[in-house]
Image (cartoon, rainbow, N blue to C red):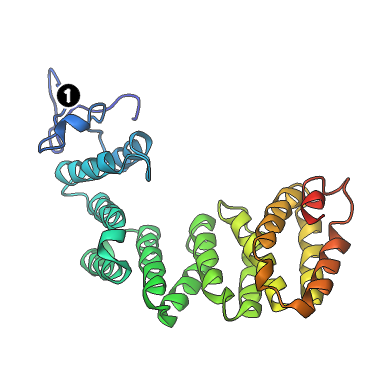
């Protein structure tokens, strides 16, 4: 559908000579190459392709506004577009106001959106509430999402990563215990979780637990452990000031016991040295 866009306005059944859809409003001239597609889901994918987040936010904003005009009867598309517009405004609104605005959309669209899409918005809201005031309820919501087996690994691991970050500063041992099962999930956030888990074990100063986890992880993930641990060790190197002085020798001894072989760990071994 991205290659053969429909050039019909929503609700139009047929057109003998379809013409390209036009964009109304002051941003019309900005959205060339953004024709209307048959579905809101396809339109959102095209938007991400044409106007990536963090690169063309002015065009991204205009495209979301246009999608709201094109697909007003598609609640999932409208919900995603409205949440995405709020995301563009988070810095201007502030974390708390941004979170409240998302909460209002969640209430408004309640049962009209999928469980996964709702979880995405709840994740954004919980992260913002934690940043605003370190709300314990926000942490609990992130942990609940991470444990929700109805969600895919992508959503669960990102929720787990953010929950682990919340726990790391004051409760590194709890962070390590919470993150351990999620480090096993092969998903986009796995490298970040492995790095955070290593930092949590190191900050907790529990070399025995660290060595046990490392040994099991390296054995279970023979094909990917080297790259994952290399990235984790790089993150640990930037976190050394937060390691307890008395725990450093035992922590690095535990690391060396697992990553000592440069043949098995060609990337991680140099990072440890």
Please tell me which residue is depicted at 14% across the width and 27% down the height of the picture.
14
Q: Is residue 134 something one can see in this rendering? A: yes
Please tell me which residue is depicted at 14% across the width and 21% down the height of the picture.
19
Closest to the observer, 220 or 96 = 96
Could you tell whether 229 is left or right of 58 in the image?
Answer: right
Could you tell whether 88 is left or right of 73 in the image?
Answer: right
The quarter of the image holding the N terminus is top left
Task: Please determine whether, in this image, residue 97 is positioned above or below residue 29.
Answer: below
Instruction: Count every numbered label the image shows and give the total.
Output: 1
Task: Please determine whether, in this image, residue 155 is positioned above or below residue 203.
Answer: above
Tell me where residue 121 appears, x and y as whole percent.
35, 62
Q: Give the image quarter of residue 167.
A: bottom right
Tell me where residue 102 appears, x and y as whole percent.
28, 65
Closest to the observer, 150 or 265 = 265
User: How packed is label 1: few (under 14 Cα within 10 Å), some, or many (20 or more)?
Assistant: some
Q: Which residue is mark 1?
A: 20
């Amino acid at each position: 559908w991205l290659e053969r866009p429909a050039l019909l306005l929503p609700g139009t059944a047929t057109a003998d000579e379809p013409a390209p859809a036009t964009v109304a409003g002051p941003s019309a001239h900005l959205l060339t190459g953004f024709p209307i597609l048959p579905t809101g889901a396809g339109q959102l994918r095209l938007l991400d392709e044409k106007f990536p987040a963090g690169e063309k936010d002015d065009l991204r904003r205009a495209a979301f506004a246009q999608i709201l005009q094109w697909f007003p009867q598609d609640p999932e598309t409208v919900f995603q577009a409205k949440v995405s517009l709020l995301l563009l405004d988070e810095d201007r609104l502030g974390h708390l106001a941004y979170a409240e605005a998302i909460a209002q959309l969640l209430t408004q669209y309640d049962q009209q959106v999928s469980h996964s899409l709702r979880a995405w918005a709840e994740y954004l809201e919980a992260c913002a509430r934690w940043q605003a005031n370190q709300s314990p309820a926000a942490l609990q919501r992130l942990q609940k999402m991470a444990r929700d087996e109805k969600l895919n690994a992508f959503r669960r691991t990102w929720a787990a990563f953010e929950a682990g970050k919340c726990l790391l500063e004051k409760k590194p041992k709890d962070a390590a215990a919470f993150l351990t099962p999620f480090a096993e999930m092969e998903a986009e956030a796995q490298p970040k979780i492995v790095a955070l888990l290593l930092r949590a074990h190191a900050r907790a100063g529990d070399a025995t637990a660290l060595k046990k986890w490392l040994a099991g992880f390296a054995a279970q993930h023979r094909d990917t452990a080297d790259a994952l641990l290399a990235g984790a060790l790089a993150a640990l190197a930037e976190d050394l000031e937060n390691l307890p002085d008395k725990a450093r020798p035992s922590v690095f001894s535990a690391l060396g016991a697992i990553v000592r072989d440069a043949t098995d760990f060609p990337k991680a071994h140099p990072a440890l040295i």
